[in-house]
Image: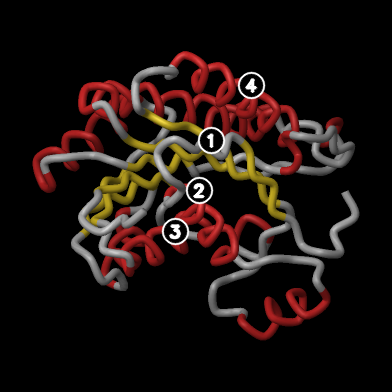
Amino acid sequence: MTLDGQVALITGGSSGIGRATARLLSRRGVRTVLVGRSAERLAHVAESLQADSAVVAGDVSDGASIDDAVATAMERFRRLDIVVANAGLYLGGSFLDADYDEITATVQANVTGVMTTVRGTLPHLIEQGSGDIIVTSSVAGHVDVPWEPVYSPTKHAVQSFTHAVRQQLTGTGVRMGAVAPGVVLNELWGYGEDEEERIEDKVAERTGIRSDDVADTIEFMLTRPRHVTLRDVVVLPTDQAI
């Protein structure tokens, strides 16, 4: 299926998987609305895109920010076809060392942010009788990771949410699925975009994947025939033992 001419709303669009997805979809002719906390970083990404784009700075756990993003899509592009609910935070380590505020922020970004994004965009997709929602989950949502006692439960919640809403969408023409990466060599895991040599070393070791690899997977999910839904796709580094 071609994506040319469609419009995508991407949260967490200023870095990592969101940035890579925006760039890939833009090369396929998709216009984008990028959502994130930093207007400056979003603008920097938007400048690198081939297709037309807009940016909305805000907190994805705040419904008003998502409403602003949807309104921007409708005013600028007159449609919305793809939603990539990607924004999230990482918190690992000993639970006894976890700060209260960090726990709250991680849950709000990873769970509330996904729910708010889907709630704010879904009416438009249902109204037009078509569209795709892709949620960025994690392999940590499929297994219990002992060194991620906050992050892993948030991704389990995301998996449950995705499965429940997908079943409610039966008959609407709207598809919903989750992509669940392992170790991705981006800012979330402490790898800057400019650290190409360090990233390539991990890729060569097969212990990490690029954000572009996840973006490729998202594109594959979006371009399946409309009678096919990829409910869950787990994408791992070959030598990640999990």
Q: Residues within 10 Å of mark 4 (few under 14, many from 20)?
A: few
Q: Residues within 10 Å of mark 3 (few under 14, many from 20)?
A: many
Gap between marks 1 and 4 measured at Cα: 11 Å
For badge 1, the amino acid type reads Gly
Q: Which residue occupies the foreground of this view, 113 or 26?
A: 26
Left or right of 143 on screen, residue 90: left
Q: Residue at 34% across / 20% down in the picture? A: 172
Gap between marks 3 and 2 measured at Cα: 12 Å
Q: Earlier in the sequence, mark 4 or mark 3?
A: 3
Task: Residue under label 2, please give it.
Answer: 221
Task: Residue under label 3, please give it.
Answer: 21
The reply to whether discs 4 and 3 touch (Cβ–Cβ < 8 Å) is no
Task: Residue under label 4, please give it.
Answer: 160
Q: Which residue occupies the foreground of this view, 106 or 202?
A: 202
Q: Earlier in the sequence, mark 1 or mark 2?
A: 1
Gap between marks 1 and 2 measured at Cα: 8 Å
Is the residue 84 above or below the residue 240 in the image?
A: above
Q: Residue at 59% across / 44% down in the picture? A: 179
